[in-house]
Image (tube, rainbow, N blue to C red):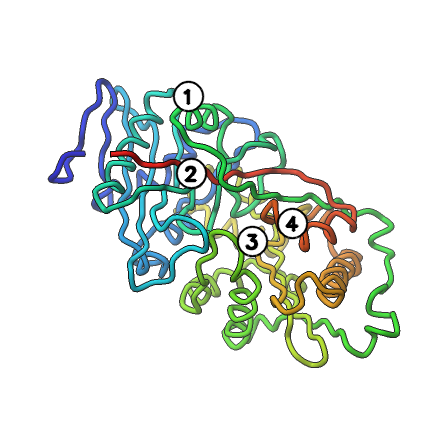
Amino acid sequence: MDAKGKAMSLGAIEIIPVNGLTAFLSFCRLPRQIYKGQSGFAPPLDAERWTVHGSKLNPHFKQVDWQAWIARKDGKPAGRIMAQVYKKDTPAPVGASSAQFGCLDAVNDPAVVEALTRTAEKWLRERGATVVHGPFSPSVNGEVGLLVQGFDAAPMVLMPWNPPYLVEAIEKLGYRKARDLISYRYDVTAKDRQAKAGILDRPEWRDRLKIRTLDLKKLGDEAAIIVDIFNDAWSENWGFVPFTLEEFMSAADGLKLVMPPEGGFMIELDGTPQAFGIVLPNLHEITADLGGRLFPFGLPRIIARIRNHAFKSGRLCLFGVRRALQRKAAGGAVILAFIEEIRQRSAKSSIEHVEFGWVLEDNIGMRRPIEFAGARIDKIHRVYEKKLTA
């Protein structure tokens, strides 16, 4: 891209800045165009992507200066990338660079990946960046990392997917591991469906621990508690940026449409909310045949399917335990109580497996109870870093 923000040609590869509606729509649908038919990939709905990447729809973009680009090769869509820098008056990511890239997708051509990353790096350098981390798409509270393990695992809602060649291409360009993010698969068994309360029946916890269902009709009232717990729980984690109430509320209407009544939990200890969890059904089960298109016929189909479909998989997409309980017996009890509650509710559910993810690789306090419960590592996503030289 030149100084005026116009398209830049690198041989047969053209890098086009995403300025305007047409380019934005192309940016959102590009992954389903280039990854169609690949094992492990499920096309997200274009309309859902608009809410994630649209600067007027996602409050995250108020916190950053950003730019996105599309790559075209021989006149065809070949890749995309975005770059962002957190503004000085907003909280900086914990331990990570304020300069980040995200939404890296490309065809199997190292030259395309190089052209995209080179463009993003140049934009970041011009804004004073010396180190870049990513992918954050668009933030640590969104879709994070490149998939490095589990390419053929069941695709899951709101989890990024990329082909193996993208990992090889970016590592050849000098990008190195910063952190790995672990996602676990828990397979629900007949034994789980017959499970009885364990932790909650112990004398030391019976009167102290309570689990209630989130009130979807008053999700707005629950939001302040959820955001407060989440930000406290994650505040010391690498890459953390506070999840704003505005960001949560922007997604609340969508949550109410797709989250089953039993999908939200609030855990109270001694009468005070100390943890929460939100399990979403895996919408890919009912959208895969739509090819990403919601209009004109996709919307009524989805509404009917959400009401009638017996989902086989789901994802624990939001979870938090207050920091004061972490690495303590009470924190472990809260996590185990949560897992036991999922087991008991499975008796009335068709879900056969739940994905717990993601968890930072060094978050042993969270990983141990999950592994103790019998979950196994299913996917690993990697956040990369690179020093930007002059």
- Can you tell which of label 3 and label 1 is closer to the viewer? 1
Q: Nearer the viewer, residue 75 or 248?
A: 248
Q: Secondary structure at mark 2?
A: strand
**Amino acid on which disc 3 is placed:** Ala
**SS for dot 3:** helix
At which x and y percent is residue 35? Answer: 45, 29
Q: Marks 3 and 1: CB-CB under 8 Å?
A: no
Of the numbered discs 4 and 3, the one sitting upstream in the chain is 3
- Residue 369 position, x and y percent, is 74, 53
Badge 3: how crowded within 10 Å, few (<14), some, or many (20+)? few
Q: Which residue carries the number 4 mark?
A: 356
**Residue drawn at point x = 43 percent, y = 34 percent:** 32
Asked whether 252 or 238 is in front, the reply is 238
Which amino acid type corresponds to the residue marked 2 in the rendered image?
Glu
Nearer-N-terminus badge (1/2) = 1
Whole-Å distance between the Cαs marked 1 and 2?
22 Å
Which mark is nearer the camera, 2 or 3?
2
Q: Amino acid at mark 1?
A: Asn
